[in-house]
Image: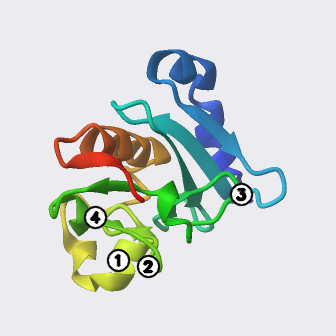
Amino acid sequence: MPDKIGEFLASHNLELLKAIKGWQVERDDVATDVVRLTLSAPDGERYIVRFICDGYPDIAPRVAFVNAEGSSADRTAWPAGNAAFYEVIKHPPHSFLCTDLTREGFEHHAAWVGRPTAWKGSTHTLMDLFNYIQDDLLNSINYQGRAQ
């Protein structure tokens, strides 16, 4: 079976992404379907985002902010924002991103599968999610710092 996550990682210069964007991308040594992205918000807060990629790329990843120990149940691992921000960011105990690029989004909104922007394994990659989290969430005017 092809290693689609490995192919994705190998197709990107991760050192260049670290230098340009400040991103640290790591694949779990044991749970090889897990990728973690560490990135910064404009206020300097660093966040870790876990992507569970079983079924990648055909099935959208599960996505959650996690603490250094890997727990998505830690509220302080998550960013905070205004009402528009919370349409996507679902803090613990729910702990997921509600968008048409995540598996959880589809689980909560089955009709989203038909959206033109919805995750499609033939066109979307983890990079789409990396950029979405950085640009549309953390760099947005709706972002208001780290959750308390």
Q: Position of residue 4 (x, y in %)?
A: 63, 50
Label 2: which secondary element? loop
User: In the image, what residue type sits under mark 2?
Assistant: His
Q: Label 4 neighbourhood size at 10 Å, few (<14), some (14-19), many (20+)?
A: some
Task: Of the two numbered discs 1 and 3 on the same chain, state the one appearing first in sequence.
Answer: 3
User: In the image, what residue type sits under mark 3?
Assistant: Glu
- Left or right, 40 with respect to 6, comes to left
**Mark 4 or 3, closer to the camera:** 3
Pick the front one: 65 or 98? 65
Which numbered circle lies on residue 69?
Answer: 3
Q: Which residue is mark 4?
A: 88
User: In the image, what residue type sits under mark 4?
Assistant: Val
Q: Gap in Å between the C-alphas at discs 2 and 1? A: 14 Å
Q: Gap in Å between the C-alphas at discs 4 and 3? A: 23 Å
Q: Which residue is mark 1?
A: 106
Which numbered circle lies on residue 124?
Answer: none
Q: Label 2 neighbourhood size at 10 Å, few (<14), some (14-19), many (20+)?
A: few
Task: Of the two numbered discs 4 and 1 on the same chain, state the one appearing first in sequence.
Answer: 4
Q: Gap in Å between the C-alphas at discs 1 and 3? A: 27 Å
Label 1: which secondary element? helix
Q: Gap in Å between the C-alphas at discs 4 and 1? A: 12 Å
**Mark 1 or 3, closer to the camera:** 3
The answer to whether 90 is drawn above or below residue 70 in the figure is: below
On the image, which quarter does residue 6 sit in? top right
Task: Of the two numbered discs 4 and 2 on the same chain, state the one appearing first in sequence.
Answer: 4
Pick the front one: 36 or 107? 36
Pick the front one: 90 or 108? 90
Q: Which residue is mark 2?
A: 94
